[in-house]
Amino acid sequence: MPPQLSTGALLRIMKDEKVPEPIVQILQSKKINCNSDKERYRLLISDGKYQISHAMLTGVSGVENFSIIKMKQYHLSELSSSQKINKILLIIGMEVLCSMDEKIGNPEQLTDQVIASHSSSEAKPVTNTVQSVPEQPRDLNQSLNQSLSESRVISQISALTPYHNKWVIKARVSNKSQMRTWSNSRGEGKLFSVDLMDESGEIRCTAFRDLADKYFNYLQVDKVYYFSKCQLKPANKQFNTLKNDYEMTIGNETVIEECLNDDGLVPQVKYSFVPISSVAELAVGALIDVIGVCKEVSDIQNFTSRTTNREMTKRDVILVDQSKTSITLTLWGSQAESFDGVNNPVVLVRGAKVGEFGGGKTLSTVMSSQMKINPDIQECHKIKGWFDLEGKESDVKNLSERTGSGSFQSQWLYLKEVQDKGLGNSERGDYFQTLATVLLMRSENAIYKACPTPDCNKKVVDLENGMYRCEKCNREYPNFKYRLLVSMNIGDFSGNQWVSVFSGEAEKILGKTSQEVGLAMEDNSEAGTAIFQNANFKQFIFKCRAKVETYNDEQRLKIVVVNVENVDYEKHSGQLCKEIAELTGINA
């Protein structure tokens, strides 16, 4: 005997009544074509008395026609159109009870007219396994976590679709982007995104403009939150590589609450660490999880991007692990500025990008990368123990080793040696460092008026009406910022060389900010010129990039100062002793 169908259950469900685990028959099923690894089916189902065609099955591999199922979890959702509001029954979880060869009974189509003709008093109220989500107050400071976590039904991330809007998910923030800004002909604004995960999957959630400011500090990596009333839309796979067909957008109706009593049901962030030695076999562009001890760290390097003309900041970190292999990890922007390599911290990067430079493999952070310093996980304690016991003194293979100037440990050269060695002919240029004296710092054309936005340093055009236009941003501004681009002649005992210096490093030499220099030049040109003259005959260690460039079919060596340091004469004396020892063969 087949199980008895829940006669009349579909009518009661479509009237928003609660029916516990109704038993229905699938009369027809049709697979929905979608770009997804998760199959979805449109169903015609019957309870023996009524049948409906607005039903959808998701998250399973389908069932045979005339099968009898028990609907263990479902949602009734409303889909608005220009004409009417359609109710769609989403079956999230079900159990196949048996298979049949034919339809049971002679059910009639459950139309809106049939539903309207029945009074709600005819139905008997029963308890449903799927509870409606209670209205939630907007004050995030109210302590509602304990009571609401007991009463609300939590949906899984993998079950979210645009056809179902009454849901609450409980998810952990696995990654959080930096705040980004944009400015174009359509306006300007800011945004950031978080990646959310639960036991079923992951999804990206993005906030824009005022809502980005509201939630940026509130949402923290590794914490668990309740999310509801976000907008769901197809994921833009050009920028979103998560394994989900959809992504969420935070709106004015969105409710986000921190889960203060984490019960451990939401999994922790999982990492798939790749040993540094294995990076050699990976393709360029691959994104990997890596953990290593910071063995060395470079100074901040400031330079101007050729493609965007924006000033960039980076720092190189050498990581080493138990495979006795090291690799150079490049940090960018605020991560580079805030990184502290003191006491050899353990560095974890989720989603580091594999690169290649000069025949060696490298790693770098990208927008979606997440970096943690000394995380409280087993892998961190294990690798730190190895480094302290033996790794610190072990010989390691440098996976980033390349020809030329090496990684960021640039070769020491005198200025004449730069010419004699023919530096600057490699594709990306050659790096060197030298101790030299400032012979002349030109004040002419050393300062310019630039776009005031933080991410743009393009020179602006004075419209002579109190406004300044940036051609790159295609906008006009009532203000500007001063920027330095200085031509300078430096020398040592072997010769002299003209070099270019950008704002950040020029400020170190002048002891003034670009704004201070610009105002001085504007108010009193003699006082401004004196700032440049005061820098003459000062000594610094200059780290430089040499590159041969072609102008009007003529090749010229262009040298840009990428970093300026005050001279540590004791340390430099040690460097000179080392060079003497190499020349004479006598240990210094």
Image (cartoon, helix red, strand yellow):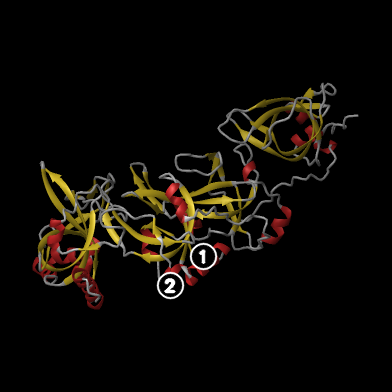
Dot 1, crowdedness within 10 Å: few (<14), some or many (≥20)?
Answer: some
Secondary structure beneath dot 1 equals helix
Q: Position of residue 145 (x, y in %)?
A: 67, 60
Does residue 87 appear to the left or right of 368 in the view shown? Answer: right
Rounded to the nearest angstrom, the CA distance separating label 2 from label 1 is 14 Å
Q: Is residue 556 above or below residue 510?
A: above
Q: Find residue 48 and report its horizontal and vertical position in percent.
A: 83, 27
**Disc 2 residue type?**
Asn
Q: Amino acid at mark 1?
A: Ile
From the image, tell me which residue sits under label 2.
Answer: 343
Q: Quadrant of residue 483?
A: bottom left
Q: Is residue 322 left or right of residue 472?
A: right
- Residue pictured at 44% horizontal, 62% vertical: 320
Which residue is pictured at 45% across the width and 54% down the height?
277
Q: Quadrant of the C terminus?
A: bottom left
The answer to which of 581 and 543 lies nearer the viewer is 581
Residue 344, how many percent across, how many down? 43, 69
Say left or right for 493 vs 51.
Answer: left
* Residue found at the very far bottom of the displayed protein: 570
199 to the left or right of 216: right
